[in-house]
Amino acid sequence: MELSRNLSWPFSRSRTHAFLVSFFLLGLFSYLSATLAGNSTTATAGASSPRILFSNSLYYFSPITSFTTRFISGNSPENQTNENPLSVEQTQQNYTETETKNLIDNLASCDIFDGKWVIDDSNPNPAYQPGSCPFIDDAFNCFKNGRPDSDYTRFRWKPNGCQIPRMEVKEMLEMLRGKRLVFVGDSLNRNMWESLVCALRDSLVDKNRVFEVSGRREFRTQGFYSFIFEDYNCSIDFIRAPFLVQEWKMSDMTGARRDTLRLDLVQKPPSKYHDADIIVFNTGHWWTHEKTSRGKDYYQEGDYVYSKLDMTEAYTKALRTWAQWVDANVDSSRTRVFFRGYSASHFKGGQWNSGGNCDGETQPITNDTYLLPYPRMMDILESVIKEMKTPVFYLNITRMTDYRKDGHPSIFRQPESQRRPGMFQDCSHWCLPGVPDVWNELLYAALLISRRP
């Protein structure tokens, strides 16, 4: 139209309009043809590649039983592929700004949970030195309790096809400036929480400006703890909720009180956290305990107590209660929600209370045939997340932890002076420094990706 006003055309006005319309339609057809061809090529090239897809600027990590990364919420957009991935041989340190951008772009199309554990000779130091952090529970402090080997602190996770960056502590603290990060779940989440607090604290000159608000140094007895980083005006909290739903007591026909688990009520938190900036949930291990797994006269909905209910059905009901609570209470425009998957245990010869052991293990599993099948509980979790409207990051650490039979406290959950014959070993939790430090590197990588345009 601008041309028809400013140029002298050898056509009548009607012919000019017809020419312009035809020219526009021809150009549009050419553009759409080229675009469709390009998309077809991209889809063909990327069809077999693991990838991460996104919604509302939040990414979903979910390598499932095939261990490819894919979007697991409803209404997923089409996948995006990423060309020119960064070489996995490139050094993990001293990145330029361009290299950092390429690394983050490559993470977005990589399955960061499919890989192997390697000794990192280029940077053999853990996120914080053994014995240096006063906020590690004694039961996780294998160094303090006399564990003689140290390779369990040196292994790093190396995905197949990309690299996860080492946590840049100052950048992580800047991302948390003025914010609140909350871990909600069982003692495995407490494991991860203590790891992150210690890693971030280690970089500060004045470590006295990091403290638990109530002055506590032991974190097993209360339902809520909060670490303040004064220089960054941020807090990193832990809320104990091993089932995510409410533990309960009710009276039976004789008037005696008995324990039940309310599958229809989210656990009432000792501190409100729905408006936190980042929330990391988990639940899993308590569902495998004897009373929970048997499911006899234990699971309750409303006033009804099931005489017998399969644990997997109860777990599904509980996760749906949690999901409905998240959808109703969490504003996804300001809060990023993570769910950390099941952390593998390595008891041999029995369970924790029947002589199970893992002491003497100093190297990870290297033969995949010794790994356990993907847990049914995590299949259930994925199906529940698919039904949610709230974007959820699924940190699928199940397989990567299954390799690490060497990383548990075992007999080093206590100092030698307190050990007695027949006392149980800990083959569920993890030594610190150790495996949970890598979970926090994955959390850091996810936050980097979520900031990507």
Image (spheres, rainbow, N blue to C red):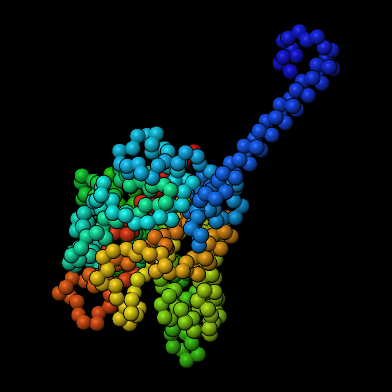
Nearer to the camera, 320 or 431: 431
Q: Is residue 397 left or right of residue 42?
A: left
Farthest-out residue, left: 417
Q: In this view, does 432 lie above or below 246?
A: above
Judged left or right of residue 335, residue 176 is: left
User: In the figure, is residue 106 to the left or right of 264?
Assistant: left
Q: Which residue is drawn at 38% across and 64% down?
A: 367
Given residues 183 and 125, the one toward you in this image is 125
Of residues 57 and 44, the one nearer the viewer is: 44
Q: Can residue 272 be seen in this view?
A: no
Q: Which quadrant is the N terminus positioned in? A: top right
Residue 96, percent from left and from top: 35, 34
For residue 292, what is the image quadrant?
bottom left
Q: Which residue is drawn at 76% across and 8% down?
A: 8
Q: Where is residue 192 in the image (x, y as percent from the top left)?
A: 34, 59
Residue drawn at (26%, 46%) of the image: 122
* Residue 423 at x, y percent in the picture: 25, 79
Horizontal side of residue 434 vs 379, given as left or right:
left
Question: Can see residue 93?
Answer: yes
Q: Would you identify the image quadrant in which residue 6 lies?
A: top right
